[in-house]
Image: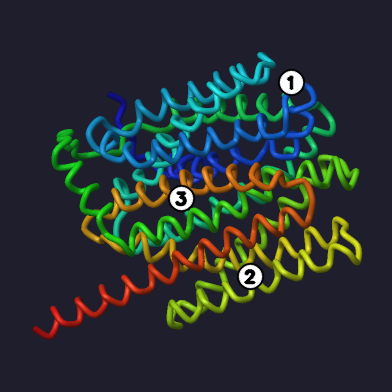
Amino acid sequence: MKTLKENHQGFSTVLALSLIPLSGFATDIYLPSLPAMAKDLHVSASAIQLSLVLFMFSIGVSQIFIGSILDSFGRFRIGIVSLALFSLTSFVIAIVPNIYVIYAMRIIQGITIAFIVVGKRAYFVDIYSGDKLKHYISLFAIIWACAPIMAPFLGGYLQSVFGWQSNFYFLGVLSLLFLILELIYSGESLKHFYPFKIRSIAQTYSGMLKTPDFILGLAIIGICFGMVVIYSLSSPFIIESVFGYSAVTTGYSSLLSGFSIMTGGIIAKSLIKQPLAKKVVTALIVQVSLVFLMILTVPFGSNIYTLIGFTICIHMCGGFIFNIIYGYCLSRFSKNAGVASGLTGGAMYMVSSVFSYGFANLYAVKSQTLLGIANISLILVMGILFIAFNRYRKVRVSNELKTAFA
């Protein structure tokens, strides 16, 4: 087994940071190409949207379980195989224009991306400690947020100039380059391999899944992300088919959506000392108000500016809520932070994929009005979940205080 050389540690760290946003690139780069893919493959909009949902669901399911596999069998070899498979499947999608082949390849890609990203997050825990580890962990969210901003922007230009296949050729070449660099400069970072004991692993997961505030928190962040995914699934068809703009414009709209989510997260971080319930309730009220305005302004003229303008503000609120509840879920089980992290990330993708695809097709979102109706439906579900979440959270805090003073 190839171990990580000390003189390669610096460049290996850069590679690890660079691979973290690969999941976002694989998700978002072909969003502007959805209408062109549907037309070229002679399938419906919902059929081509399903390729994204299957990818998200597979990456979600995989993240839940693979932490224990990586702790038992190491990061490097699994990461290398995953990169090779991701590159291969990207080229297959570009070469074989068949929707069922694309579905199969996207499911495989979701699994491989989960191994790559979770393994690279674990790399930093293996190599660093103390303030240096905190420094790198604080970069994760910022680096991950770069992908939803840059990927559709790049994908829009690739689609406009070379066609939808170019997005997957790009992913194939990019992952192949990373594979070569990993073989040269990286190695196994895990120092202590843990036995793979299914019973103890199952007990840990069972305990977490029986915790009401944690489960409700996972549902809330999944729906928050689901609102973004609904826009990602429907905006290419609204912007390109209804408003008549190009895929490049779709890329710009996704870029602005990504910036708004990041901004919401930054605002939440700046208000970290404020009461959790007060912050979330305020954001939900603002979100509901914005969605109603989004719907009510349609009779006076729906255009790309009203669509994107309201979406930016709605997604900023979503990013704000997501940051708060996501942080709560990650810190809920300090003794099993790795498993909690995998379960949180996995559940987020699973819940968002089910809700986004379900609501996008339930309302057949092809206009600003229908997008607003889908959004308000998700916000109402999220509000109900938050009421229950806050009730269980208060019970937990009360019990902890009683234990502390007992």
| Up/down of 245 relative to 375, above or below | above
Question: Extreme bottom residue here?
Answer: 405
Residue identified by numbered label 2:
287
Location of the N terminus by quadrant is top left
Estimate how packed mark 3 is, as few (under 14), some (14 to 19) or many (20 or more) residues with alpha carbons within 10 Å: many
Is disc 1 placed on a helix, strand or loop? Answer: helix
Residue drawn where x is 22% and y is 48% of the image = 206
Residue identified by numbered label 1:
41
Q: Which mark is residue 305?
A: none
Residue identified by numbered label 3:
348
> In the image, which is nearer the foreground, mark 3 or mark 2?
2
Work out whether mark 1 precedes mark 3 in sequence or the reverse, and give the earlier one: 1
Q: Quadrant of residue 336?
A: bottom left
Residue 401 is left or right of residue 175, and the answer is left
Q: Decide: marks 1, 3 in contact (CB < 8 A)? A: no
Question: Extreme front residue here?
Answer: 362
Residue drawn where x is 27% and y is 75% of the image = 395
User: Which of 53/1 is in front?
Assistant: 53
Is disc 2 placed on a helix, strand or loop? Answer: helix
**Which three-letter amino acid code belongs to the residue tagged 3?**
Met
User: Which percent across, then down, holds residue 118?
Assistant: 39, 42
Work out whether mark 3 precedes mark 2 in sequence or the reverse, and give the earlier one: 2
Q: Decide: marks 2, 1 in contact (CB < 8 A)? A: no
User: Which percent across, then down, holds residue 207?
Assistant: 21, 53
